[in-house]
Image (cartoon, rainbow, N blue to C red):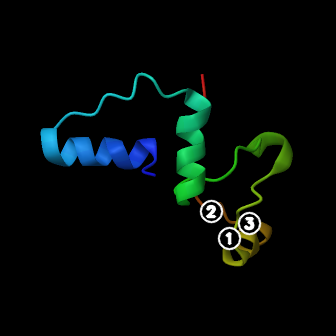
Amino acid sequence: MTDPFDLCIINIQVEGVCYMADIEFDDWIQIGIDKGWISEPFCHTHDGDPYMTEEEEKEWEDGGDPCCHVVKFI
């Protein structure tokens, strides 16, 4: 069975349109997690960055400031 995101991509390629109004936010986020595009949600303020690489951790510990791209859900 084709998942909703794959159907969206197919619609874009064939018709140039993608309507995903009937997909819930949680399902949309889960698609990104399942595809490996985004991480599980976490609190950067309280949990730090559990996805930081060893190189980034070393840079952080050495006083550097590795870039961390964040999206805040409103």
* Mark 1 residue crowding within 10 angstroms, few (<14) / some (14–19) / many (20+): some
- Evaluate whether residue 14 shows in this view: yes
Figure check: 21 above or below 36: above
Near-viewer residue (21 or 57)? 21
Number of the label disc, if any, that sits on residue 60: 3
Q: How many angstroms separate mark 2 from mark 3 (CA)? A: 7 Å
Near-viewer residue (65 or 35)? 35
- Residue 14, percent from left and from top: 15, 45
Q: Are marks 1 and 3 in contact (CB under 8 Å)?
A: yes
Instruction: Find numbered disc 3 in the image and state the secondary structure of the residue it sits on.
Output: helix
Give the residue number, with chain letter if any, for mark 2.
Answer: 66
Name which residue type carries label 1.
Answer: Glu
Q: Earlier in the sequence, mark 1 or mark 2?
A: 1
Question: How many numbered badges does the structure rendering display?
Answer: 3
Instruction: Find numbered disc 1 in the image and state the secondary structure of the residue it sits on.
Output: helix
Left or right side of 28 for 2: left
- Residue 74, percent from left and from top: 60, 22
Q: How many angstroms separate mark 1 from mark 2 (CA)? A: 6 Å
Number of the label disc, if any, that sits on residue 56: 1
Number of the label disc, if any, that sits on residue 30: none
